[in-house]
Every structure is written in C-alpha cells, then in structure tokens.
Amino acid sequence: MKNTNQELKKEARKLLRQAHYTVYSIVRHVAPSGMSRVIDFFVIVDNKPRNIIYYMENILDYKYDKNYSGVKVDGCGMDMCFHLVYSLSRSLYKSAPNHENDGGYRLRSENI
C-alpha cells in the first residue's frame, strides 16, 4: 500500500530531524550535454547513511534513474543538488507570509 503524500512528508520530517536537518548529495552522472544529471541523496542517522531517494522521488515528483541510482534532474547553470534540497525543504516546512522564515532554508545541503 502506498503512503499518502502527507504521511510521506511526516516520515521525512521525522527522519530529517534525526539527521539534524542535513542532506548529503552525490552527483552520480552528468549527461554529455551537461543539461541533466542524476543525483543521489542521503542523511546520516545514528552514524549510518540512510538513502532518501524515495522521499525525493515521491514528494518532489522526480523520476528515479536505475542506471545511475539517483533522481534525474534537468537543468544547468546552478547548484542542482542545493535546488532539490531547497525544494524538498519548501515542500516540508511552511514559509512565513513575509518570507522572513523561508521554509526552503530549513534543510542544509552538503555536496560530496
């Protein structure tokens, strides 16, 4: 049985709290054109890495790339790892109407 989006978000928030709100990313593949890449995401909980691709895939609606084990994202010219972590954070944490407490900055993005 598939989890609802709200259940997934609740699970993700709990896991991210245990990981001290830090998400690590590894670029697994860059297309020869440079216009897309496959990125793997994980957190550290109890000194062990925990893959969070399932959450990135289902909460943000990105496709999983079986060949390179990560989510495929199109685009270039910016830090796509940060972009996806920011997008996840925005979807999980509410932002204040005046943009002073942007929920997108709740999570910290670390590239490896």
Image (cartoon, grey):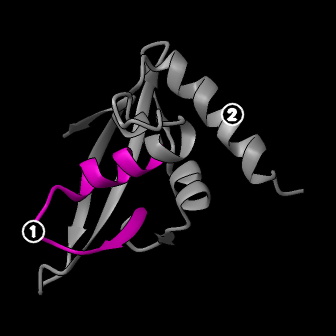
- Quadrant of residue 24 within the rendered picture: top left
Asked if the stretch drawn in magenta spans residue 63, the answer is: no
Which is more toward the observer, 88 or 103?
A: 103
Which is more toward the observer, 48 or 108?
A: 108
Evaluate if marks 2 and 1 touch, with contact meaning CB atoms under 8 Å apart. no
User: Which part of the image, by quadrant, shows the C terminus?
Assistant: top left
Marker disc for residue 11: 2
Where does residue 16 sit, x and y in percent of width and height?
51, 27
- Quadrant of residue 36 within the rendered picture: bottom left
The magenta span reads 69-88
Residue at horizontal 90 percent and vertical 56 percent from the top: 1
Q: Is residue 4 left or right of residue 12?
A: right
Residue at horizontal 29 percent and vertical 45 percent from the top: 25
Given the current orientation, which residue lies at the most extreme right position? 1
Given the current orientation, which residue lies at the most extreme top position? 46
Question: Dot 1 corresponds to which residue?
Answer: 77
Residue at horizontal 42 percent and vertical 31 percent from the top: 43
Q: Is residue 16 left or right of residue 84?
A: right
- Quadrant of residue 79 within the rendered picture: bottom left
Q: Is residue 100 left or right of residue 52?
A: left
Mark 2 is surrounded, within 10 Å at the Cα level, by few (under 14), some (14 to 19) or many (20 or more) other residues, namely few
Where does residue 35 sit, x and y in percent of width and height?
18, 81
Q: Is residue 69 above or below residue 22?
A: below
Circle 1 — which element?
Answer: loop
Which is more toward the observer, 51 or 16?
A: 16
Asked if the stretch drawn in magenta spans residue 87, the answer is: yes
Q: Is residue 42 above or below residue 30?
A: above
Q: Is residue 86 left or right of residue 54?
A: left
Give the amino acid at mark 1.
Gly
Specify which label sits upstream in the sequence, 2 or 1. 2
